[in-house]
Amino acid sequence: MQSRVTHRIYWLPLVLFAFLSLLFVAAGVYLDNEDKRVRISKAQSIAEQVKISLEVFSTERIQAVHNLMRNWPTFAPNQVDWFNAQAMSLMGMQRGYSSLTFADQNGVIQWVATPSHGMKTRLSNELIGQPLASVGLTIPSSADSLASTLVNSVVTGHYHIVVGRTISPQELNHGYLLAGFDAQTILGVMLGELEGPQFNFALRDSGHTLFSNGELVDDGTVITTEPFSFIGRQFSLSMQTEVGRYSAGVLVAVIGLFMSALASWIFHKQMKGAVRLSVSQKRYLTASEASLDALVIYRPTGSDYELVEANRYSRFLFRGACSELSIKTLKEQLAFLGKADLFHCINEVATNNTPFEEYISIEGSKVAPEWLKVQVVKAGDNIALTARDVTERFKAQQALKQSEERYRRLVDGMHRHFVYTKTAEHKFIYVSAGISTILGFTPDYFIEKESRLVRKIPDETFDIRMKSGQGVKPAPYLVHYCSSDGTELVLEFSDTPILDESGALIAVEGIARDVTKEQELQAEVAYQANHDQLTGLLNRYAFDKQLREILEANAVNIPAINAEIDRDNVTTIYPSLISANTTNPGVMCFIDMDRFKLVNDSCGHPAGDKLLQEVSTIFRQHISDKDLLARIGGDEFCIIYHEQPLDKVKIKLDKLLKAISTYRFMYEDKLFFVGASIGVIEINPQEHNAAELIKAADNACYKAKHLGRNRYFVYHAQDAQLGMDSSENDVLHTLHKALQFDGFELYSQAIMPLNGITEDDNRGLEHYEILLRLTGSDGTLISPGLFIPLAERHGLMNKVDYWVVDNTLKTLEANPLHVDNVAKVAINLSGITLGDEITLMKITQRLQGTSVPLEKICFEITETTAVTNLSAAKHFISTLREIGCSFALDDFGAGMSSFTYLKNLDVDYVKIDGSFVRNIVHDPIDHATVTAINNIAHSMGKQTVAEFVVDTATANVLKALQVDYGQGFALDKPKPLANRVQWLTKLVSV
């Protein structure tokens, strides 16, 4: 309702404007019409005077011409002279003639008199002798009236009126008399006084404008006279009094409209101000009553102030004193609240007009709140006091302060950690005291000198800052700093971006910690994961990744960036290999040591290890920094001559083979000659993948071995279609023959308890592992390292595994006394067998039909095989465990994912890989690794077996670590299974 009334009031200025505008416009129209009436009247008066003047002029001249005709002599000696004299006399008395012309009775001009002189002019001479028609005038011979015409002079450009008649209509022989008048000259003389801005007029003759002044404007004020006669012509005169520069009516209307608008605008402003003031007062009263602040108005009374007004909330806020609020002065009210000392400050507000603000605490129950925010300002001659209850805010601030103090104590007490705050430009503005426990610097010093203390920033710094700017939390990153003692430490930062309401980055907060030791440990572990523990060369794991990287880089013809390779672990060793060479990736060499087994079997594993270390040194001496050297097996190595042609590689291999052939290995009092068989293949990503490349190089290596050893053989694509050479063919033939005629020989090696903790061990039962030997056609043993890969390549491995299982069971079945004194017999199975369902079924049937207690049979599978074929391994294990067999995980620790899969494989024994065991006495890393594997296996309820126990010191360390079993030359050397069975049977029977 109030809004409607306000809108109606705002219509009043518009109504006033309309009324005043209408009044002024009406006055303007009246003045304009009156001005037109006056102009018309004035124009009519002037026009009538002009008309009369012209008629008088015309009558006098026509009458003079008639008089000349009447006085024409009947006979004169020379009529031309007489006419000339009379014409000159007439023109001298009356002005306005332009010429008087005499023509004979035939209408031929005889004389032309002009007012300027009596002599004939050039024009006169031209007209004399011409007919009257030449001047455009035709005079009837019998006419008594004047004939007239209007001629436009070519010479002067003026209109001329020419009138004429026969001198005597009764006596035609007298001829004709013509009178010419220059109309424009005559009118210019007669109307010259009217020329000027006061009048606009036009004198016309039959549509010809003879004389004019100004431009007639058709606004209703132009008057035109009735046609009147002038020297034989009919003229009309149009006249208009010129409009003034400014129309009084228009001026009155325009000024009136402006004044109306101004008056209405002023009226509108005054009304609007009044309405706003009224509304504001109402709103103020409403807001004051609804306000959550107490508002009290005081007016000065002498040296004190008297209460004038108080809103509703003030009575609620001061409810403890509300009954007395209206009767007390300011001094009394302050004294009542116990704040009398504030009067002086409030009085300063009234004196100096300086606002006053203070937080005060109220004790007791005089008022509701405990804390008040009081503000005092001057309001005209009065003072206004507002009070707000800030008790909850103060309590929250106190709680926040206490929380901040607790947080500060927590943050400052952090060891090797600190929190920080950075600007949007990533400049440190705060770090906690924990920085001093890491770098040894105070927080202020670190903030000031941070840029100088940095030794290395992450490569992805730009991406980190870009993500923070987008409000995305980046992954933790590492920064290297110099500490106060000069050492370089690694700090891990975890940034959290802080954004404002618009989404713009305003700060970065986070926590940082010292990860120097973690990084060192990770680097050490990574090194161990990618390097052979014995030789320090890359291992098979790292080599395969590098080889795939080279193939992928050259296959796509772009620089290789393999996200799978840990660049801190591998690429830092051979960084040149992570670049693509689209023209010549290089040459790969597969090296197998000749007569290595002889050293190993004759002198034990320590001698073999020493030989491998010394041979590795020879290999290093024959490669460059950009080449790749790895140990991928027991006595197998691989070299990649990076970006080198085959011809140059052959030269290097000749030198390498010569160095190996001249090398003599001395161990204790024994001297050995060793050699190397090398398979060579050019790397071509378009023809081979990594597995095919290694297989082809392996085949070439065997060909080199069969061709006489200590040489190299270059693999070519056509070699894949060639048959095997005679040596390899002999081995394969021997394999087939052994499978058919039981040509294999079973060996065994004892697995000895180290601590005698099991029930079976206490009864003296024996544990041993089944080993396999093959005798060649020449009667010598063929190394398993030779015939096992050949069996795998030709699909015979599952048959070999079944032969071992079957014949082991046959031997045990034939010697039940031996079986009674055996705790476990371990049989190795290959990865091919694990994935062969048919072989699994055959082994299961064979086991179910044996008389040997199946709890005495333990199958060994390697960790690599199990992880590679996890689902098949789990199926194989579960199937045979259901019928009573146990399982051991062989070569455990060779892979870095062992702990992840160990809990998923239901095995009973964990055989710790010999690479960790052989150096456990001297290598703390190996010692820690074996300790971790043993503890984790025990925590899962599994027993442990340590391989490659080469001496008593190693056995003692393993005993101290509580490893359950040991296997190696220091405990027992391999012997034929038949010998072990006979010996044990005899021992039992005795």
Image: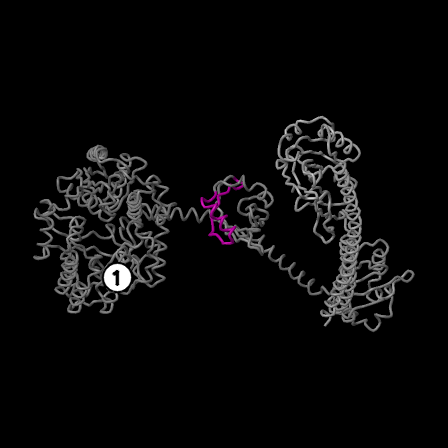
Residue 856 visible in the shown view:
yes
Quadrant where the N terminus sits is: bottom right
- In the rendered structure, the answer to whether residue 889 lies left or right of residue 801 reads right
Place of residue 118 in the rendered image (x, y in percent of width and height, measured from the top left): 73, 27
Q: Is residue 857 above or below residue 499?
A: below
Q: Which segment is the magenta one?
A: 457-485
- In the rendered structure, the answer to whether residue 67 lies left or right of residue 942 reads right
- In the rendered structure, the answer to whether residue 530 lies left or right of residue 37 reads left
Q: In which quarter of the image is residue 364?
A: bottom right
Name the amino acid, label 1: Ala
- Is residue 130 magenta-colored? no
Place of residue 218 in the rendered image (x, y in percent of width and height, measured from the top left): 70, 51
Q: Quadrant of residue 373?
A: bottom right
Which residue is the site of mark 1? 873
Considering depth in this image, is 142 or 135 the residue closer to the camera? 142
Looking at the rendered structure, the secondary structure element under dot 1 is helix
Crowd tier of the residue under label 1, counting other residues whose Cα lies within 10 Å: few below 14, some 14–19, many 20 or above: many
